[in-house]
Every structure is written in structure tokens, then in C-alpha cells.
């Protein structure tokens, strides 16, 4: 869900992404060139002023008499023209920046709309496929032959993976569009984290990993959306399971005054410092894993934490595991 390369489904977005990058590069080159010209023109004034002061100070020459006066007047006119030209260029640069920002915003809106429409169109057929495969696996249409069972199980696994991807894409588009409503209700975090631990206990045991959930005895409650908070913790634990081959994963809850802190620590390979800068970027996969993913789990977790007015960060060194830390206010000042 988190540390990962650009997934195959994102290749459909390449034309829009390429257009955005090309526009950015073109605008950047043009504006830098204009800024350089404007800077050169506007530096004429201080340069001529310096020359004037040096002449008066060291040579005791009157620059206002005779031929010197004509030269001075000409230099002053050139300086004023340079100032006006530089001012006009800077105004043009600002206008171009505004236009470029509008175009980039439109491209981003088109990309988000495209992703949302594709995800929405895929949801219904995936639901039908999943139901049909579940019926086959349950024997509602007759028992499966031994050689058929692995094929049906494989199809179920892939359909479930695609369904999760579609759900993640829909969440991303809703969050970016500001259309993801959050409930505002008391949430007992021991209940949420306990459910997350039970959800992954079987998978952790299959992989030979120890999954521990460390919770305080006194109930720790905050105001927020229970389902979305659980989604955050599920994404983080799933990400830890994906990259941890041996050792343990610890899920810890700490109550700290008006805030709570949830930590997900693993004994995986750790994260390079350069990769930590982009680990919460959408469609980014950092590190190496045999499991496929879209690189949306951690970005969604970050966005949901932001919507709860909290903070999320990672502490990691190569070869020393990783620790994801979430800090949330118990009662947000502004409703999420």
C-alpha cells in the first residue's frame, strides 16, 4: 500500500501527466529567461548610480556640465527605460504564471475526473465478478473439481486486489475534491486497534511474524470517524506486513494529554533517507516487495490523518526497520 513504483493502472494517466510536465518545463524555461532579462535591465540604474558616485568622489568631475551633462542625461534616460521595460517584463511574467497555474489546475481536474470516472465504471462489474466467483468457490453451482479450485482462488485474489484499488482511487478523488464526508463521534481507539490486530493476526502467523498490539488499560477516546481511522491503521499495518519478512510488527497506543499517538513499528529493511521524502506521494512505491500495490495506501492514510487535524511521519534507517507515528487531537478545534 505504501512503498512502491508506479502501478500499471496509472499508465492510463500518462498523457495527462506528460502534458502537465511539458507545460511546467516550457513555462519554467520561458519565465526564467524573462526574469533574467528584467533583472539585467533593472540593474542598469544601480550600476549607473555607482559610476556616478565614483566619478564625483574620486575625480571631482561635475557630471552636470557640458558634454558630461549630456552623457549623464542620456544614462538617466537609458536607466529609466530599463526600469520601465523590466517592470513590464515582470508584469508579463506574473500574468504568465497565473495563466500557467490555471492550466495546471485544469489538467489536474481532468486527471482527477478521469480517474474517478474509470474507478466508478469498474466498481459495478467487479462487484458482479466477485459475487460470481464467491458463488463458485462456495459450491452454489456444484462442487469444483480439484484442478478448478486453485484457478478460482487465484481469480478471487485478483478481483479482490482490483476492488481494493478501485476503492483507493475513489477515496483519492473524493479527498482531492473535498467530497469525503467524515463522521464526528466518540471513538474508543482500543476497540479500533484491537479489531485491526485481529484482522491481520492470521496473515501474520502464516508468514511467521509476531503481531503485537499494546494498549493502555484506561479507555482512550477521541472525536472522529471510526471507519476512516480504522482504514488508516489497516493501511499502515498492511504496509508493514508487505515489507517485513521476519521479526515482529508492533501496534502501540499512547495517550498524551489532549492528544493520542499511534505507532506502527516493524523489523523490515527500513527506508532510505531519500525515499522518506516521497513515501507519502501518490502512486509511489519505495523499496522492493513481491506484492503488487498501487502506492495509494500511505497517501490515503496521510490525507485521512490531515482531515482529522493530525500529523503522520515515519522514522526509519536502512536495516533498522521503520516506525510510522500518527498523532491526533482528542477533540479537534474544527470539526473534521
Image: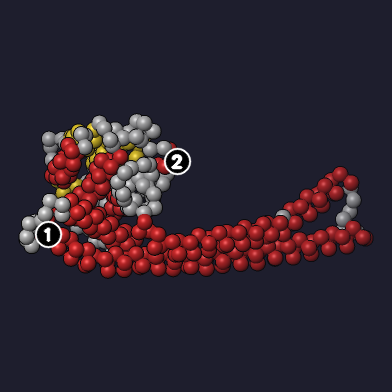
Task: Please identify the quarter of the rendering in which residue 164 is found.
Answer: bottom left
Foreground residue, 42 or 214?
Answer: 214
Question: Mark 1 packing: few (<14 Cα in 10 Å), some, or many (20+)?
Answer: some
Q: Where is residue 224 drawn, in percent x and y?
A: 21, 52
> Which residue corresponds to the image point at 87% horizontal and 60% vertical from the top-left?
71
Is 18 placed left or right of 281 in the picture? right
Q: Is residue 254 visible?
A: no
Q: Which mark is residue 136?
A: 1
Q: Is residue 124 visible?
A: yes
For label 2, the SS is helix
Q: Can you identify the residue that label 2 sits on? A: 274
The x, y position of residue 213, in whole percent, is 18, 36
- Above or below, 323 relative to 224: above
Find the distance from the CA under tag 2 to the CA under tag 1: 47 Å
For the image, the number of numbered tags is 2
The residue sitting at 72% across, 59% down in the picture is 41
**In front: mark 2 or mark 1?**
1
Front residue (pair 92, 109)? 109
Across and down, in percent, residue 5 comes to 39, 49
Residue situated in front as seen by the camera: 117 or 136: 136
Q: Position of residue 38 (x, y in %)?
A: 67, 60
> Which residue lies at the image location 19% right of the left edge and 57% below the top edge?
183
Amino acid at each position: 500500500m505504501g512503498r512502491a513504483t508506479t502501478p500499471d493502472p496509472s499508465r492510463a494517466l500518462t498523457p495527462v501527466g506528460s502534458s502537465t510536465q511539458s507545460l511546467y518545463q516550457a513555462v519554467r524555461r520561458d519565465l526564467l529567461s524573462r526574469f533574467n532579462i528584467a533583472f539585467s535591465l533593472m540593474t542598469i540604474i544601480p550600476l549607473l548610480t555607482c559610476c556616478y558616485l565614483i566619478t564625483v568622489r574620486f575625480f571631482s568631475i561635475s557630471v552636470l556640465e557640458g558634454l558630461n551633462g549630456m552623457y549623464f542625461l542620456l544614462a538617466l534616460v537609458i536607466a529609466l527605460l530599463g526600469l520601465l521595460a523590466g517592470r513590464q517584463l515582470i508584469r508579463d511574467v506574473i500574468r504568465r504564471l497565473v495563466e500557467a497555474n490555471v492550466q495546471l489546475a485544469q489538467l489536474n481536474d481532468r486527471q482527477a475526473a478521469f480517474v474517478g470516472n474509470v474507478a466508478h465504471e469498474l466498481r459495478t462489474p467487479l462487484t458482479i465478478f466477485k459475487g460470481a466467483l464467491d458463488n463458485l468457490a462456495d459450491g452454489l453451482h456444484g462442487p469444483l473439481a480439484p484442478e478448478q479450485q486453485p484457478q478460482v482462488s487465484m481469480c478471487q485474489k485478483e478481483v479482490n486486489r482490483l476492488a481494493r484499488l478501485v476503492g483507493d482511487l475513489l477515496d483519492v478523488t473524493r479527498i482531492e475534491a473535498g467530497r469525503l464526508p467524515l463522521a464526528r463521534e466518540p471513538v474508543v481507539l482500543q476497540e479500533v486497534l484491537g479489531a485491526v490486530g485481529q484482522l491481520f493476526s492470521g496473515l501474520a502467523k502464516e508468514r511467521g511474524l509476531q503481531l503485537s498490539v499494546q494498549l493502555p488499560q484506561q479507555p482512550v477516546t477521541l472525536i472522529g470517524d471510526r471507519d476512516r481511522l480504522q482504514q488508516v491503521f489497516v493501511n499502515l499495518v498492511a504496509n508493514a506486513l508487505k515489507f517485513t519478512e521476519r521479526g515482529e510488527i508492533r501496534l502501540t497506543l499512547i495517550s498524551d494529554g489532549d492528544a493520542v499517538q499511534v505507532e506502527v513499528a516493524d523489523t523490515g529493511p527500513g527506508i532510505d533517507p531519500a525515499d522518506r521524502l516521497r513515501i507519502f506521494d501518490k502512486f509511489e512505491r519505495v523499496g522492493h516487495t513481491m506484492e503488487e500495490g498501487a502506492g495509494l495506501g500511505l497517501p490515503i492514510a496521510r490525507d485521512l490523518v490531515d482531515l482529522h487535524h493530525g500529523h503522520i511521519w515515519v522514522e526509519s534507517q536502512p536495516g533498522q526497520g521503520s516506525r510510522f507515528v500518527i498523532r491526533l487531537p482528542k477533540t479537534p478545534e474544527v470539526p473534521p
